Image (cartoon, coloured by chain):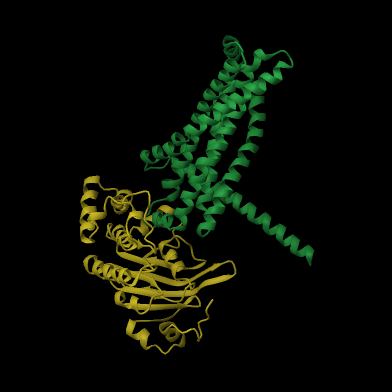
Amino acid sequence: MISVRNVHKSFGSQVVLDGLTMEIEPGKTTAVVGPSGVGKSVLLKLIMGIMTPDEGEIYIEGENITSARSESRKNEIRRSLGVLFQAAALFDSLTIYDNIAFPILERIRISSSKAHAKVLDIAEALSLTPYLLNYPEQVSIGIRKRVGMARALITEPKVLLVDEPNTGLDPLDGQEVYDLINACKSQWGFTGLVISHELPEVFQVSDRVAMILGGQIITEGSPAELIASTNPAVQQFLNGRTDGPIKIQ
Amino acid sequence: MNVVATTQQVGSFVIDTTEQWGRSWIFLYRTVLALFKPPFRPFLYMTQILQIGVNSMLVIALIGLFTGAVLAVQGEYTLAKFGATAYTGPAVALSLIRELGPVLTALMVIGRAGSAVTAEIGIMRITEQIDALRSMAVDPIKYLMAPRLLAGIIAMPMLCGMFNVVGIFGGYAVAVGLLGLSPGTFMSQIMSSVGLVDVYSGFIKATVFGLIFGWVACYKGYTCGFGAQGVNKATTQSVVTASVAVLIVDYFLTSVLTRVFMK
């Protein structure tokens, strides 16, 4: 579904990704974990085609987004993606209704009556109906995340990318987002890629977990396999220790 | 050692500046191109004309009124030394229409709306709203920048026209009402001194300044750095760069237009 092959990315002299290779299996949710600053969000932006790797290739449903030269070609490939951003990234000049309707009106360009029906359906499914006329700043961050999820899913994407699902949320709101991801996955059945540094919480939405360190995937497997890993860096990160191979920057 | 370090710094500055300059021209090219590509979204263009143009009307009228009034006082004082106070009207009108109208309108719009455009786009950049647009296969250049650029190009000459009219009224009120000049002389001298070429050249300048306003404000917002400090810096740079650019371009435009229309 998503294939990342030997991807390199540097910013000046700082090497962020150094030959990273990974496969994301169809229908499964893979969590990419690692300490802050190891390039998890960069990987997400490379998959979205917002950044271009220095070297390597990324395939989404067999289409190479890294070799797409024009923005319109990238847009064709992006049509299979839905993205839930870290702070939801809602358009603050639009109401919640308009935020949810935005992708179908702009991307699919269906009639406004069909769009209206779809917005009401997804708002109902995600318990957003009472907030449709509010603006993003008028609701809590938890609701904003739900709106972000509705916006990401309204086009029925084959792949859902989630960046740091519970950053800035209290434990209750954080848990609500994980429950939301699981509920949406069972309803819409997408392939998921979740970027997170929250362990072990992220395991509850993950079929597979990959850990990035030094610009590469150092271990990959089921959550149970990650927990059982003998890699000292994995154990240090899992246990939140400051001593070990991972240097605090 | 110092020579090497200085050379490196100068070289790095030249490379950075050239790169920025090149990027900003590519940005302008892409934005202009986006104006002609479907889908067209008239509502977005109207909204920007409202925010940049209509919402600037009050401040432009106020500045125009007092600029005209000051020109009348200064003009009458200077011309009285030559016994030529009858020419106060043309002095006010020509100064406004040819020079002060376009320049002061541009500087005011840059200060009021340019900073707002840069801050708005900059905040959209740092809160990932622009990334969200791209992830939804919506081109941010077309969706955000093109409407603001076109709104600047359309609104600036209109505001400039209003500035001129209100400014001449301010000059008239002071010259006739306070300084005792004849209303007939004031107006008839304007009619006989101001030609269409003066009006054209003022509007051409205002249109170019509108382009500079939209270009700089959007580019600085789109390329703004990280966090609140990044937006702060981009906003300041936007206002300073656009204001300086307007004054520099004004000199060259005045030189060219004067030669063109004099022929």
Q: From the top left corner, tell me how far across and down residue A111 is, in percent.
A: 24, 45
B218 or A139: which is nearer to us? A139
Colour of chain B in the image: green
Say if B175 sits above or below A112 in the image: above
Q: Quadrant of residue B135?
A: bottom left
Residue under the point 46% across and 88% down: A232
The residue sitting at the front extreme is B178
Say if B82 sits above or below A15 in the image: above
Residue under the point 37% across and 38% down: B42
Q: From the top left corner, tell me how far across and down residue B173 is, in percent.
A: 55, 19
B90 or B40: which is nearer to us? B90
Q: Quadrant of the N terminus of chain B?
A: bottom right
* A180 lies left or right of B216: left
Q: Quadrant of the C terminus of chain B?
A: top right
Q: Is residue B227 visible?
A: yes
Residue under the point 50% across and 30% down: B159
Q: From the top left corner, tell me how far across and down residue B74 is, in percent.
A: 66, 23
Q: How many marks can you see?
A: 0
Residue under the point 54% across and 53% down: B232
B173 or A206: which is nearer to us? B173
Q: From the top left corner, tell me how far across and down residue B126 is, in percent.
A: 47, 58
Q: Is residue B194 visible?
A: no
Q: Which chain is yellow?
A: A
Say if B247 sits above or below A249 in the image: above
